[in-house]
Amino acid sequence: MDIEKVWSKLTASEQKEINKLLKAKTYPNILGDTFSLQREFILDPAKLKALYCTRRSAKSYTAGLYLIKTALERPSTSSVYIGLTRDSAKRIVWTDVFKAILSKYNIAVKFNETELTITFPNGSIIYILGVDDSEAEKDKLLGKKYALAVIDEAASYTIDLHNLIYKILKPAMSDLKGTIAMIGTPDNKKDGIFYDLTREQQVSPPSRREVNGWKVWGWTAYDNVYMKDAWNETIMDLKASDPLVEEQPWFQQHYLARWVIEDSNKIYRYDHNKNAWNGELPDYGWKAWQYTLGIDLGFNDATAFALLAWHENDPNVYIVRAEKWRHLTITDTANNIREWMGEYPIGYFVVDGANKQAVEEMVRHHQLPLIAAEKHDKASFIRIMNSSFISGKIKVYNKGCTQLLEEYDKAVWNKRALEKGIYKEDTSYHPDIADAALYAYRYTYSYAYSAPTPDQMYKNDMEREMGEMNARFTKEKMEREELIWGNEDIYS
């Protein structure tokens, strides 16, 4: 073929385009060594994607490949890797992922160790940020256009990821038609957008499905061809040392990708086997049950009510009923309290005292006998309550307290504070009813319980029998009189 002759027949613009292609640097196929699921996830054209896996499933390595591929193929664009903190992001991906991949394929880039940026010869940049504990880092996301944003450790954020994604990142994707990908393994919290998307995701066998506009993928370390043998050996070793290891929450999280919470991370230690109750209060005869109503005030956050029962002859506290509503006014709340008063003989009304104005309004204007809850040293009172949960001395009526049980399941301590021995609530999820129950629990006195003596039990039985006898005689008398007088009211 006469190359010069063919070239002469091309237009100037065609010659220019071919020269541009000839001069363009070609890059190696960095997906050539990936396993099939990893490669398919990266190539999936969905603009919102989530990857839900066990540990050692190559999640972060997948993120690195995805970001580098995007930078190479889309010149002069920005992409971002988002971790929990700057230090954790650097520790996870800077050396073992980005530097390892770029070195393996001999791709020349400029690393900025101070700014944590990777600049490519074609003008593309990858930013590495940690946004969960730094507003300054989060602010760096503003004002840029992104081709790809990968959020790693997506189960562990304390900030609202929904807001981060839809209010900050999504607008930044518009110009370049970019993609947002969340990646993670279950953690000690059941809340947030990543949990909502993945709580029903199957990882073994691998799966992919559409959820609320997201393409959600799931697989395990067994699907990582570079890790499956070592992974299997690790699991066999764990089972050999502890045959019941599969029952441990940490094992189910890391090795099975299941949403369970370790007991040490739960704020409230409710256990269905110890604390569930059928709703029937024991009968102690003539001595009445005492009731305490706990109230946690809110408006955008819910206003919550928890009713607790206790008795001087019973060692347990019973959570009878628990409910919450949003957007209640002070008058709405006062009316609700009066409804509870009409149904139960409540002796104590314990309210969150943070909103002093609202409390005073209900006391003075609505004439309610409210007691302001003490809120200092809350963690200590939670520990006291937990000791009763653990010993089985708190009973919860499942049918009357479904919202409360959901809160007990989801409320966790702040992960990073707990690692330092500090008991601080994770504020991304607010257990309103659990707070109301805690306030009320401090005004129950089952700890002063004394078991009824044989004489008391005999007296209770006698009184119960006398009451039943009187009721039976009264009923029989009324039936006889009705036969004689019909339905006429003989006492009118």
Image: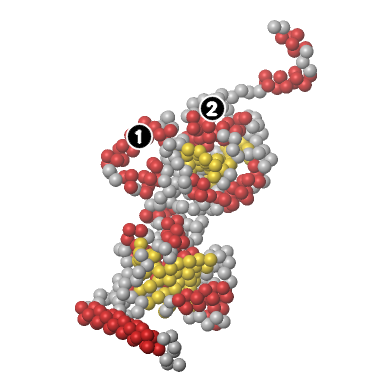
491 or 427: nearer the viewer: 491
Above or below 289: residue 247: above
Residue at x 57% of width, y 75% of height: 331
- Amino acid carrying label 2: it is Ile
Residue 386's x, y, as percent?
Answer: 36, 63
Q: Quadrant of residue 488?
A: bottom left
- Mark 2 is surrounded, within 10 Å at the Cα level, by few (under 14), some (14 to 19) or many (20 or more) other residues, namely some
Using the numbered discs, state the Cα–Cα distance from disc 2 to disc 1 in whole angstroms. 27 Å
Above or below 491: residue 135: above
Residue at x 63% of width, y 45% of height: 170
104 or 414: nearer the viewer: 414
- Mark 1 is surrounded, within 10 Å at the Cα level, by few (under 14), some (14 to 19) or many (20 or more) other residues, namely few
- Amino acid carrying label 1: it is Asn
Quarter the N terminus occupies: top right
453 or 7: nearer the viewer: 453
Residue 462's x, y, as percent?
Answer: 25, 82
Q: Is residue 386 in view from this perspective?
A: yes
Q: Quadrant of residue 484?
A: bottom left
Q: Which mark, residue 30?
A: 2
Residue at x 62% of width, y 30% of height: 73
Residue 115's x, y, as percent?
Answer: 58, 41
Quarter the C terminus occupies: bottom left
Q: Which mark, residue 306?
A: none
Residue 321's x, y, as percent?
Answer: 43, 68
Residue at x 43% of width, y 32% of height: 224
Tell which circle, 2 or 1, labels the residue nearer the N-terminal end: 2
Q: Residue furthest bottom?
A: 492
Q: Which mark, residue 232?
A: 1
Q: Secondary structure at mark 1?
A: helix
How is this picture coloured? secondary structure
Front label number (2 vs 1): 1
Q: Residue furthest top?
A: 1
